[in-house]
Image (tube, grey):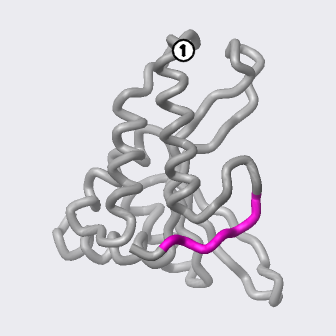
Amino acid sequence: MKKTDLAYTAGIMDGEGSIGIARHKSKSCKRGYTLELSVQVTSSDEWLCQWLKFAFGGSLSHSINNAGNPMWHWIIVARKASEFLKAISPYLRLKRPQAEIAIQFQDAKRHRQSKTDEEAAIEEAQRIVLQQMHGWRNDKDDRQEMPER
C-alpha cells in the first residue's frame, strides 16, 4: 500500500477511529473472560468503511444513530488489528500512544487458555489504560473529560 494511503488512513483513525481491548465471556478460561484487541471506525460515509474493509480486511456493520441517520462501523480484531496499527502507526498523531499499547498487548498475547497471573494482570492493565486514554471510566460506560496535555 502507498505511504499516502497509510497516512490518509491514520488521519481517519485519529479523527473517527477507536482502539480498545474488550472483555468477552468465556467458560473455558479460568477467569471467566478473555481479552481481545479491536480497532473500529464509525462513519456516516459507507464508501469509507467499505474501502477500509477492502484495504485491510475486517467486517462491516450498519446502524441508525439517534438522529435517524445511517452509520457504518468497520471493525478489525486481534492479530489483523495489530498488523493494521503497525502499518499506520508512523503516521498517527493523536492515537499513536494507544496504538503502541495495543500492539504490545497483541504481540504478548499467547494463544493458550492458561496464563500466568502476571500475564493476566499485564493484559488487564493494558485494557484499563486504553479505556482511560479513551476518556472512559474503568468499569463504567460514562464519558469523562480527557485531561489536558
Vertical relation: 73 (above or below) 16: above
Give the answer, above or below, for where 47 lies relative to 13: below
- Quarter holding the C terminus is bottom left
Q: Quadrant of residue 45?
A: bottom right
Q: Mark 1 falls on what kind of element?
A: helix
Which residue of the protein is positioned furthest toward the front in this rendering? 148
Please name the residue shown 37% across and 54% down the image: 99
Side of 143 relative to 19 (left or right): right
7 or 70: nearer the viewer: 7
Predominant secondary structure in magenta?
A: loop
Residue 131 pos. (x, y %): 58, 53
| Picture coordinates of residue 3, whole percent (x, y) | 17, 69
Question: What residue is drawn where x is 67% and y is 38%?
Answer: 23
Identify the image quadrant of the N terminus. bottom left
Residue drawn at point x = 70 percent, y = 12 percent: 30
Q: Is residue 27 above or below residue 6?
A: above
Residue 139's x, y, as percent?
Answer: 73, 47
Q: Amino acid at mark 1?
A: Asp
Q: Which residues are magenta?
A: 141-147
Viewer-closest of 54 and 96: 96
Q: Number of marks in the image?
A: 1
Quarter location, residue 62: bottom right
What residue appears at the point 35 percent right and 57 percent down from the top-left corner? 97
